[in-house]
Image (cartoon, helix red, strand yellow):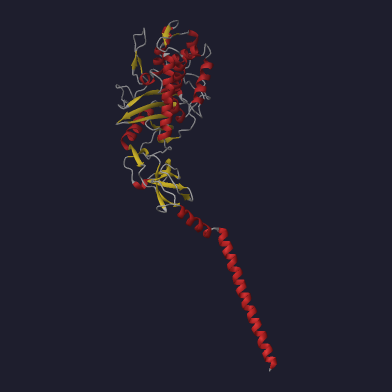
């Protein structure tokens, strides 16, 4: 029952994240910044409303290295009934598969033949990025077939809506068919954050497993207070590094009521040549920028007049003011100027009374205009409602109908034809009278 309740809670929290992002969610608006990240692929997203505030090749397929282990955690947690009490045997034949790979480990080779707690394996997976922990978990859940575990990873990716992700292993070791994108990693991580223990484990700096004397240390120097890369507002989540993937990082930061998730993939790295931690410097710079330069702003409220529209058959005025159906609240630069916000409307033609205040009569699309480039980016599109009810008038409807007849295409054609016939008749009659007069004058002349 405990496990079922936890799973139901996870599903609820996942749906909450998705609904929150879709309701408050805007388009993807990338704001101008002086930060020039060295990572090849970047996605910075608000965790408060799901809004993208900065991206760089976020849909480019990239090698994820050990950020893969976020999905490994998900599959492990969702397929082990009792995480706290289940123990898994560490098998030599499983660890032997990592020989010669240069894998980061959690020193499980010291526990071959022993049964290790799953919770310790999850810490070993996420804190020191233990490939050995990933393999032990995958072997257990796959019933000795790691491919079955990987199949579950891919099925879960599909379930989460990841369009450009494919896994080949549970640890992130390089494989040309093992890839994802920054955007897909946000989806995967959002789901992982709904699972119990994930936030705590992924933000742990030091952990000592049962029976060990030496503590495991995090590979995420952003959260290590003893590191030169320490960033006080950062929380978790997962690093990754291979020669082919470069340095990778998924992390979050919160301050002053704002929270952001950041994915960085493909930062420069070459063992023994280029080993600087550009993911950490990129992360600190981008977090510093968004936490100090952006803020949640209500651009338009349900009381803000957007435009006016003519209404037929109305007892009152011929025009009605239209307002947004909901507040347009989104993240914007804190120094936002009015000229950087543009609203374009699309209102139904030939509106007729009666109209209620909740009737949808059109839409308003709100755009952010980059002050440097002039680029227009969609923020959000909302429905438009009348600011007040518009009552029906039968007399006005009659006048409108008559006016519509007089303005109609066929009426004008008929009137035109009548006028033309009358004109022809008038000319013909005049010609006829002229001829008759001439004939009379000729007869009169002959009589003389």
Using the rendered view, name the quadrant where residue 190 is placed: top left
Residue 365 visible, this orientation = no
Using the rendered view, name the quadrant where residue 304 is placed: top left
Image x and y of residue 358, in percent? 42, 41
| Image vertical order of residue 354 relative to residue 406, above or below | above
Using the rendered view, name the quadrant where residue 27 is placed: top left
| Count of residue discs | 0
Residue 417 visible, this orientation = yes
The answer to whether residue 177 is left or right of residue 266 is right
Residue nearer the viewer, 424 or 136: 424
Residue nearer the viewer, 165 or 283: 165
| Image vertical order of residue 80 relative to residue 434, above or below | above
Image x and y of residue 210, in percent? 36, 8
Residue visible at 66% across and 81% down?
435
Where does the N terminus fall, quadrant-wise? Answer: top left
Residue visible at 39% across and 15% down?
123
Image x and y of residue 136, in percent? 46, 12
């Amino acid at each position: 029952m405990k496990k079922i309740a936890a799973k139901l809670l996870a599903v609820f929290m996942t749906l909450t994240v998705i609904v929150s992002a879709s309701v408050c969610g805007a388009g993807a608006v990338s704001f101008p910044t002086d930060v020039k990240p060295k990572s090849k692929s970047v996605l910075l997203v608000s965790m408060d409303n799901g809004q993208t505030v900065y991206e760089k090749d976020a849909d480019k397929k990239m090698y994820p290295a050990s950020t893969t282990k976020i999905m490994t955690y998900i599959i492990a947690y969702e397929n082990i009934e009792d995480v706290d009490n289940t123990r898994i045997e560490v098998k030599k034949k499983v660890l032997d598969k990592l020989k010669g790979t240069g894998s980061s480990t959690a020193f499980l080779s010291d526990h071959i033949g022993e049964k290790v707690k799953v919770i310790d394996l999850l810490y070993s997976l996420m804190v020191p990025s233990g490939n050995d922990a990933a393999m032990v978990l995958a072997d257990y859940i796959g019933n000795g077939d790691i491919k079955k575990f990987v199949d579950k990873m891919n099925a879960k990716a599909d379930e989460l809506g990841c369009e450009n992700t494919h896994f080949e292993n549970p640890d992130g070791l390089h494989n040309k068919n093992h890839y994802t994108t920054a955007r897909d990693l946000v989806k995967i991580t959002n789901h992982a954050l709904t699972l119990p223990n994930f936030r705590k484990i992924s933000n742990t700096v030091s952990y000592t497993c049962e029976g060990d004397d030496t503590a495991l240390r995090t590979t995420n120097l952003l959260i290590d207070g003893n590191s030169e890369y320490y960033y006080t507002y950062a929380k978790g989540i997962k690093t990754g590094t291979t020669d082919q993937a470069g340095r990778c990082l998924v992390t979050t930061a919160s301050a002053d009521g704002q929270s952001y998730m950041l994915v960085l993939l493909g930062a420069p790295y070459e063992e023994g040549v280029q080993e600087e931690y550009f993911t950490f410097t990129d992360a600190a710079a981008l977090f510093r920028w968004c936490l100090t330069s952006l803020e949640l702003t209500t651009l338009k409220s349900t009381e803000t007049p957007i435009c006016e529209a003519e209404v037929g058959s109305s007892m009152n005025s011929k025009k009605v003011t239209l307002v947004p159906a909901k507040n347009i609240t989104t993240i914007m630069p804190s120094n936002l100027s009015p000229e950087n916000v543009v609203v374009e409307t699309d209102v139904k033609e030939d509106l007729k009374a009666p109209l209620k205040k909740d009737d949808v009569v059109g839409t308003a699309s709100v755009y952010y205009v980059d002050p440097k480039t002039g680029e227009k980016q969609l923020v959000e599109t909302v429905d438009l409602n009348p600011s007040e009810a518009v009552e029906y008038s039968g007399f006005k409807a009659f006048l409108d109908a008559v006016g519509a007849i007089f303005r109609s295409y066929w009426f004008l054609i008929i009137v035109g034809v009548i006028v033309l016939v009358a004109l022809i008749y008038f000319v013909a009659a005049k010609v006829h009278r002229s001829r008759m007069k001439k004939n009379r004058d000729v007869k009169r002349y002959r009589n003389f």
